[in-house]
Amino acid sequence: MNLAATDPKLSQDPSKWLKNYYFTRFAFSAVWVAAAFTVAKTNPPLAAILLIVYPAWDAAANFVDARRSGGLSNNKSQLLNFVFSVLTAVAVAIALGHSLFAVIGVFGVWAFFAGLFQLVTAVRRWKSVGAQWAMILSGAQSMLAGGFMLTVANGTKPVSIADIAPYAAFGAFYFLVSSLWLLVGDARRRAAATAA
């Protein structure tokens, strides 16, 4: 997913990189949600794979984005997100051997901290790129969703991958909004430059 390596223009324009990055994350999440709500609901092995892949993908995405944005050492919140997401993928694989309640509990803890790290990253990026309000909202909502999932994990109502899919769906929505908002910002800047 190292888009910057294949397009030199991305390495010179942080806004262009983020538009591509956010849209790629939207596309992945949208496909994941569609699979979770359809075939995975009645296919436990596929559901298990999807549940492990989701935090693993998040780890990979944060790693690539941090490298593209100055390196992991300069992006501590993304470094933490990367490490925590890797650990979450492992924890989900272990929790699958216990129960789906355990899996949702792991996702709840991860959603809270991933949201916190995303919020910190977005606030930092606002200074250099702007248009990060959707990512800030996404991070805050992820933290709230984490608390909700922990409540579900401690309940007695039957659970499935469909209980996690809405969390991923909101994430997809915010990534799409962020990508489109950056496009709007670029269009406004071009229009202002033309009018000047």
Image (cartoon, rainbow, N blue to C red):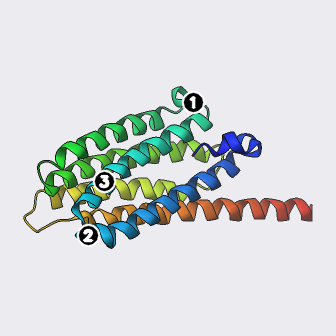
| Residue type at numbered disc 1 | Gly
Q: Nearer the viewer, residue 41 or 118?
A: 41
Where is residue 30 drawn, in percent x and y?
Answer: 46, 66
| Residue type at numbered disc 3 | Ile
Above-or-below relation of 86 to 193: above
Q: Nearer the viewer, residue 169 or 91?
A: 91
Which residue is identified by label 2? 41
Q: Find residue 7 and report its image quarter.
A: top right
Where is residue 134 drawn, in percent x and y?
Answer: 52, 59
Classify mark 1: helix, strand or loop: loop
Comparing marks 2 and 1, which lies closer to the viewer? 2
Q: Residue at x 68, y 39 (%)?
A: 5
Marks 2/3: CA–CA distance: 12 Å
Residue contact at pointers 2 and 1, CB within 8 angstroms:
no
Which residue is identified by label 1? 71
Marks 2/1: CA–CA distance: 38 Å
Q: Residue at x 70, y 65 (%)?
A: 184
Label 3 packing within 10 angstroms: few (<14), some (14-19), many (20+) = few
Which residue is identified by label 3? 49
The first of marks 2 and 3 along the sequence is 2
Where is residue 177 drawn, in percent x and y?
Answer: 56, 65
| Residue type at numbered disc 2 | Lys
Classify mark 2: helix, strand or loop: helix
Query: Looking at this rendering, what residue extends furthest in the left direction?
Result: 156
Q: Which label sits on residue 127?
A: none
Marks 1/3: CA–CA distance: 29 Å
The first of marks 2 and 1 along the sequence is 2
